[in-house]
Image (cartoon, rainbow, N blue to C red):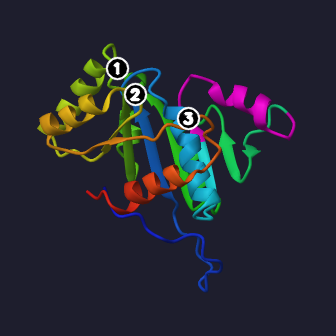
Amino acid sequence: MKKFAKRGWKLGNPFGKVQPPELIGIIGTGRGTGVTHFSVMTAGYLSGVMRMRCAVLEWNHHESFSCMEAACSSGKNGENPFRVLETDYFGKAGIDTLLLCKKSGYHAVIVDYGTVKEGNLEEFFRCSRQLVIGSLSEWQIGEFLEFEKKGIKTEKSWDSLVSFGSEEARTSLEKRLKDPVIRIPFSIDPFSVTAETMSFYEQLFYKYKR
């Protein structure tokens, strides 16, 4: 992983130029791995702790953001984007939304691409930060392992994370792949930033490099 650039939250630009945002792509190797939950968590850390202006794009067909808007947004239903805490959320996003966000002064744009089977891999690989989420549950580990094997055959550009499964299975997979498999800390509320999640993101963005 490329080292995370500590920029963006510094106010003022003497040349009046808008820096391109850090583009963070998140994708799951199957359904139910927690991609949307993790996208919200990541935005909470970057906006709440790092004081970065963030946008989260729902670039898939799950329509989870419409449910989140109804439950969490204080604005009128149907607004796009809608805001929760300090983050802007764009439902039913695509290339036009991404281009808009790139020139709108965001410091980080997080894209929820859904799963690898939804046809968004090409766009995912264009992101400067690529995070793949799998599961070590018995009925999901096959999809995760299949995708990771593709990375062994090519020059892997993403970081691998898991949300479910035993620690024994995670360490065993790390030895098999000869590459870090990072565990996402358990979080009931994705909008809440705890000491554990802060420690996790510090390692994710500053320790693990490609």
SS under mark 3: helix
Q: Which quadrant of the structure image shows residue 131?
A: top left
- 133 or 94, which lies in front? 133
Q: Which quadrant of the structure image shows residue 146?
A: top left
> What numbered label is drawn on residue 137?
1
Lower sequence index among marks 1 and 3: 3
Q: Relative to residue 115, is residue 15 depicted above or below? A: below
Marks 2 & 1, CB-CB < 8 Å contact: yes
Q: Relative to residue 136, is residue 19 depicted above or below? A: below
SS under mark 2: loop
On the image, numbered disc 3 is attached to which residue? Answer: 37
Residue type at tag 1: Ser
Residue 164 picture location, percent across and down: 40, 28
> What numbered label is drawn on residue 92?
none
Q: Is residue 110 part of the magenta span, yes or no?
A: no
Q: Residue furthest bottom?
A: 14
